Amino acid sequence: MANNAFGIDLGTSNIKIYNRSDDTVFVEKNMIAIENKKNLFAYGDSAFEMYEKAPDNINISYPLSNGVIADIQNMELLVKYFLSDLMKNNLKPSDYYIAVPWDVTEVEKRAFKDLIKEANVKARRVMIVDKAVADGLGMGIDVKNSQGVLVVNVGFDTTEISILSLGGIVLSRLIKVGGRKFDDAIKAAVRREYSLIIGGKTAEVVKMSLLDLEEQRAGALVYGRDIVTGLPVEREIPTALVDECLVEHFNTIIDNIKVILERTPPELAADIYRHGIYLTGGASQVSRLALLMSKGTGLKVNVSENPVTSVALGLGKIINDDNYKSVAYAIEGMSK
Ligand SMILES: Nc1ncnc2c1ncn2[C@@H]1O[C@H](COP(=O)(O)OP(=O)(O)OP(=O)(O)O)[C@@H](O)[C@H]1O
Ligand SMILES: [Mg+2]
């Protein structure tokens, strides 16, 4: 029987784990709730459920920040709990493939590998895969034989813009823009224009329903607290206001794509022109982002069928297909 193997994409908002034994991707919020500074109270989706609603003695946080591990202890706990759940409380020796951003320090990269080792999950082998390479595979691109592939992953805290060629990274930039900034912009616009304070979850729902609302030509109904009266109220927010406040962040992403394109060797640029941009990541689904990206760069934009899970699906391909094993590396042999 094939070895147990897991492919992990540690996202700032969602952890995605490809599980070889049943060929599925598990997705949960990468969040932990600690009570009285020491007791585990909840984790994953149930911790998120309590977020912005819990009393002061329950601290709910994301152990990752800007794509890198900020709170090692809690991240280890979470990895251990999620994997125990996946293995039904019977941890078996397993191989781990972990996707890491390219544009971070060597110490930050190494922390991902150490995390799996230190989480005591009976890791037999821990291999590193560049996130963008896994992303490309997850979107069905034969990354080992393709030249000049531009992958843009818009996540929660970060957007990773990468040029791949022949199974490796030519250029990559990690910028601090993603779904969280989109939500914050919506919160700020609603506060400014309607004197209404809404929570992050409400802003996120507005962002995710934008496309449907635009199709129905309806505004977004939100509940929040009126700044003047202090009372809870309901308001209808026009989608135009939401579109308008997101444009600034979309432009930051588009400008950074242009900077990467300017630095791309001309032969690869020709290939990129032919293929277009491969766009993925949960927040890439926001209404009008793909359209504005295409307009701003003059390139075709291919949108991912599995924006949240593309990295994990790519790790699955590496785990199951020996042909792709060479894109994974042990940290000792790291070039950067
Ligand atoms: N249908 C949707 N429309 C718009 N945004 C969405 C949709 N579905 C999910 N999102 C957003 O996608 C983001 C999460 O995406 P993803 O799981 O790719 O991020 P992550 O991998 O956790 O973050 P990062 O890559 O920055 O570490 C959230 O901001 C969420 O609101
Ligand atoms: Mg991500």
Image (tube, rainbow, N blue to C red):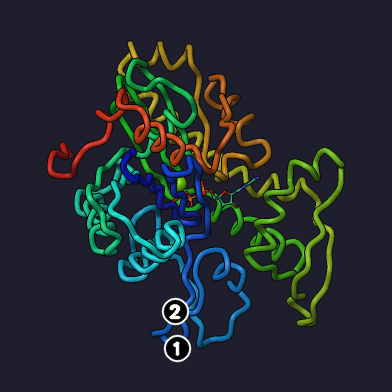
Q: In which quarter of the view is residue 63 placed?
A: bottom left
Instruction: Classify mark 1: residues with Cα within 10 Å, few (<14), some (14-19) or many (20+).
Output: few
Residue 171 horizontal/vertical position (percent): 31, 30
Of circles 2 and 1, the one toward us is 2
Q: In which quarter of the view is residue 116 placed?
A: bottom left
Q: Secondary structure at mark 1?
A: loop
Q: In which quarter of the view is residue 291 placed?
A: top right
The residue identified by callout 1 is 36
Q: Is residue 307 left or right of residue 124?
A: right
Q: Is residue 175 left or right of residue 333?
A: right
Q: Secondary structure at mark 2?
A: strand
Residue ID at (47%, 70%) = 32
From the viewer's perspective, is residue 15 above or below residue 145? below
Q: Are marks 2 and 1 in contact (CB under 8 Å)?
A: no
The residue identified by callout 2 is 40
Q: Is residue 104 left or right of residue 148?
A: left
Report the front residue among 123 and 153. Answer: 123
Report the quarter where the C terminus lies. Answer: top left
Residue ID at (25%, 50%) = 109
Instruction: Classify mark 2: residues with Cα within 10 Å, few (<14), some (14-19) or many (20+).
Output: some
Kind of residue sitting beneath label 2: Leu
From the viewer's perspective, is residue 165 above or below residue 172? above
Residue 25 horizontal/vertical position (percent): 50, 45
Kind of residue sitting beneath label 1: Asn
Label at residue 288 = none
Look at the image and tell me whether residue 140 can be seen.
Answer: yes
From the viewer's perspective, is residue 1 above or below residue 68? above
Residue ID at (31%, 38%) = 130
